[in-house]
Amino acid sequence: MANNGMEIKLPESGEEQTLVGSLNDIKHVVAVMSGKGGVGKSTVTALLASTLVKSGFKVGILDADITGPSQPRAFGIKSQGLTGSMFGITPILTRSGIKMISTNFMLKEEDDPVIWRGPLLAGAVKQFWEETDWQDLDYLVVDLPPGTGDVPLTVLQSLPVDGLVIVSSPQDLAYMVVKKAVKMATQMKTPILGLIENMSEFICTQCGEALKIFGESQGESVSQKMGIDFLGSLPWDTRLNKLVDEGKVEEYYSAAMAAIVEKITAKTEQ
Ligand code: ADP
């Protein structure tokens, strides 16, 4: 397998090769994208996956965001390389049982610089999709590279995504980034599940009150204008930030995320 330093030994030819990926039965592939970096796309991906598990689904995460080691870090997994069997690459299991594959696991050191270009990354991501021993999954959640440029586009093209979630911060909603993301998804004929507004308000660490530091939420009205569904808002919560930093995102419960997950499953399970 082409990689940036680590060797994954899979059968190269013969009967065993045909077994690679043969146990896979993945019902839904949901990709998470954002108009730009830093809006909480990776955090929302991690929360979405762990909330799906809490709802009783079998879940995998394909971390295609090479710009930061976000998924392994949020789940407290150290870069450890990958191994394989005749059924394909063995995903790493998180504490709550999420099967995870990250481009980060291909690096010798967690902070190695990644210089892959779009097509090479898309090739690796496609291989992760096809050659990982995912087995039965209800949801494979994909953390896409940030933005609406060539890299997320080629990655998106390399996967059979059946629903796209767009994450935005309140500041972005006022600009063209969400519009660009919607346009890209529409051009690719990828169904959009809806928009999540992240950091919509700030939960005061002193009094627990939700402070609307960016004014009233624009998520609903912007979604309406774009002709997509509004899935919900997540506040800026210092506790979430801390748990992500400590690699314990699975310990976070969010009623807002639970409501978002209900909407997503209702749409995809139809
Ligand atoms: P992106 O993937 O869009 O670049 P990240 O998910 O890495 O962004 O988030 C950037 C930082 O913001 C991280 O430190 C993350 O823990 C924090 N963060 C994101 N969303 C929230 C939130 N709703 N509440 C608290 N911290 C958040």
Image (cartoon, helix red, strand yellow):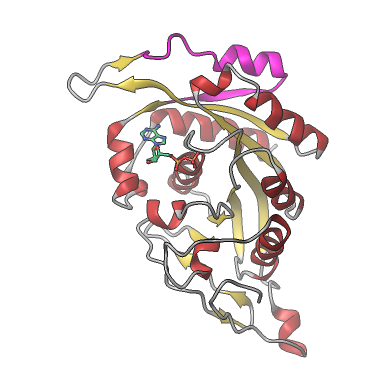
In the image, residue 200 above or below residue 163? above
Quadrant, the N terminus: bottom right
Quadrant, the C terminus: top right
Q: Position of residue 100 (x, y in %)?
A: 51, 61
Q: Nearer the viewer, residue 101 or 265?
A: 101
Q: Nearer the viewer, residue 59 or 92?
A: 92
Quarter occupied by residue 185: top right
Residue 159 forms part of the magenta stretch: no
Q: Disc count in the image?
A: 0
What residue lies at 56% left-to-right and 79% top-to-bottom? 84
In the image, residue 70 above or below residue 116? above
Which residues are the magenta region? 212-234
> Of all residues shown, which one is farthest toward the bottom?
14
What residue lies at 66% left-to-right and 74% top-to-bottom? 2
- 218 left or right of 69 in image: right
Q: Nearer the viewer, residue 176 or 195?
A: 176
Q: Is residue 102 visible?
A: no
Q: Position of residue 49 (x, y in %)?
A: 49, 47
Q: Position of residue 186 (x, y in %)?
A: 79, 32
Residue 226 forms part of the magenta stretch: yes
Q: Nearer the viewer, residue 261 or 40?
A: 40
- 192 left or right of 108 in image: right
Q: Is residue 158 visible?
A: yes
Task: Locate ligand 1 by image quadrant.
Answer: top left
Q: Position of residue 173 (x, y in %)?
A: 57, 20
> Of all residues shown, which one is farthest toward the top?
216
